[in-house]
């Protein structure tokens, strides 16, 4: 399997099937895996707040018999002294057997992978991607609906900044006849690069603003919070923060087997009276995420450490102010072309 998990499409559908079987086996017989990572160390480098992702990666490693080092507050590390991402990663990959990184800059995990001797796992890079949340999401859907093919999947909330949504769209686009209902205010619509990704994959999607009018045709409703930390203007956040609130009464219109998912944390977008509805799976989703991370670490830790290829210095022309190349200016240009358009391979924005 892929050495680094940066984007969900690093994992093929067959590799996902393998991971899923391992996830099920670990969930049913966790004791059989208690020595899987004995003697191994993961470095969890969290430059942004996290509860579930950081702690589920930590407990996953501990349950596999391994150990964890790292930080959840970069101000307590040399990052506060101005250390570059490159140097932090080069150092940490001397100490650990895998690196789990969350960073506010888009493309930071890809950048980190250039300088690492050991596998790098993207635990969220700004508003860009979050592939291991997608693993948890797919496990929940597969476990409770048995398939991905032909599902109507509603994604509701901050589709612009919600990295879990971007990764989930990329993942589900690989299965036939999935249709996305993209439910958001105009200001928080899906980014162009994700729309372009869906277009070139002939993915069916409908962009709408009303949750009320859409809920009755969904097999999955994936709620997301409005991402306050990604807004440059607090008034704009205040205006949009209550755009959607899923309430129990609205579920009368929904299908009996519809799954309600949420990557969490929830703010106000799901009313607490929904928690007891049999369709609410968001807490199970978080539990599956832990077992899935055990499966992922089991596989990733099998890669041997090796020195990274030499990396040229500087020269990137990406203009996205949130791209990691804006703060880590030594990064080389990495681009890819789709339909004659050039994209930055760190943040996926058009160059
Ligand atoms: C998500 C994230 O960090 O992107 N949370 C998570 O990892 N489970 C969603 C969010 O913060 O809204």
Image: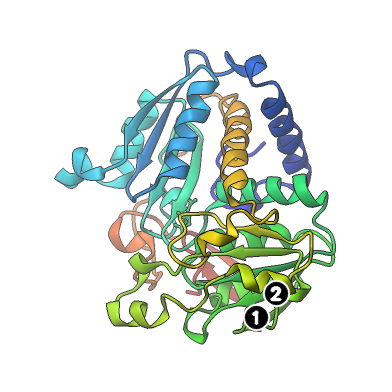
Label total for image: 2
Residue 27, image quadrant = top right
Give me the C-alpha separation between circle 2 and circle 1.
Answer: 6 Å
- Residue count near mark 2 (Cα–Cα under 10 Å), binned few <14, some 14–19, many ≥20: many
Residue 242: tell me if it is visible: yes
Q: Mark 1 sits on what residue?
A: 212
Which residue occupies 35% across, 38% down? 89
Left or right of 295 on screen, residue 225? left
> Who is closer to the viewer here, 127 or 221?
221
Quarter containing the N terminus: top right
Q: Position of residue 206 (x, y in %)?
A: 70, 81
Residue 200: tell me if it is visible: no
> Who is closer to the viewer here, 26 or 15?
26
Given contact means CB atoms under 8 Å apart, are the residues at marks 2 and 1 in contact?
Answer: yes
CB at disc 1 and ligand 1 closer than 8 Å: no
- Residue 349's tag is none
Residue 221, image quadrant = bottom right
Q: Position of residue 264 (x, y in %)?
A: 50, 54
As displayed, is residue 235 above or below residue 320? below
Which residue occupies 64% across, 84% down? 208
- Residue count near mark 1 (Cα–Cα under 10 Å), binned few <14, some 14–19, many ≥20: few
Q: Mark 2 sits on what residue?
A: 215
Left or right of 153 on screen, residue 242? left
Q: Position of residue 351 (x, y in %)?
A: 47, 74
Badge 1 element: loop
CB at disc 2 and ligand 1 closer than 8 Å: no
Which residue occupies 82% across, 52% down? 147
Left or right of 78 on screen, residue 107? right
Badge 2 element: helix
> Who is closer to the viewer here, 275 or 10?
275
């Amino acid at each position: 399997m892929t050495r680094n998990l940066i984007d969900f499409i690093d994992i093929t559908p067959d590799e996902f099937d393998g991971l899923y079987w391992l996830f099920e086996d670990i969930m049913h017989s966790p004791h059989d895996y208690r020595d899987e990572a004995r003697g191994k160390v993961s470095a969890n480098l969290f430059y942004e707040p996290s509860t579930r992702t950081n702690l589920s990666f930590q407990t996953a490693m501990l349950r596999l018999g391994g150990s964890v080092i790292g930080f959840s507050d970069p101000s307590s590390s040399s990052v506060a002294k101005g250390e570059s991402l490159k140097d932090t990663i080069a150092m940490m990959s001397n100490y650990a057997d895998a690196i789990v990184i969350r960073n506010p800059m888009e493309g930071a995990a890809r950048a980190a992978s250039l300088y690492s001797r050991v596998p790098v796992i993207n635990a969220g890079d700004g508003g860009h991607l979050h592939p291991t949340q997608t693993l948890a999401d797919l496990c929940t859907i597969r476990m409770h609906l048995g398939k991905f093919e032909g599902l109507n999947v509603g994604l509701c909330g901050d589709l612009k900044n919600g990295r879990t949504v971007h990764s989930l769209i990329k993942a589900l686009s690989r299965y036939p006849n999935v249709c996305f209902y993209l439910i958001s205010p105009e200001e928080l619509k899906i980014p162009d690069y994700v729309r372009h990704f869906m277009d070139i994959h002939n993915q069916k999607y409908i962009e709408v603003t009303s949750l009320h009018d859409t809920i009755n045709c969904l097999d999955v409703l994936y709620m997301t919070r409005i991402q306050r930390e990604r807004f440059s203007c607090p008034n704009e956040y205040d205006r949009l923060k209550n755009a959607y609130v899923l309430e129990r009464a609205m579920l009368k219109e929904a299908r009996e087997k519809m799954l309600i998912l949420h990557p969490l944390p929830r703010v106000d977008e799901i009313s607490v009276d929904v928690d007891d509805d049999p369709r609410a799976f968001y807490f199970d989703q978080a539990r599956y995420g832990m077992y899935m991370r055990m499966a992922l670490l089991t596989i990733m830790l099998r890669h041997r450490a090796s020195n990274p290829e030499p990396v040229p210095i500087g020269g990137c022309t990406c203009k996205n102010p949130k791209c990691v190349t804006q703060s880590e200016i030594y990064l080389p240009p990495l681009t890819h072309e789709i339909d004659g358009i050039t994209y930055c391979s760190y943040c996926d924005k058009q160059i």
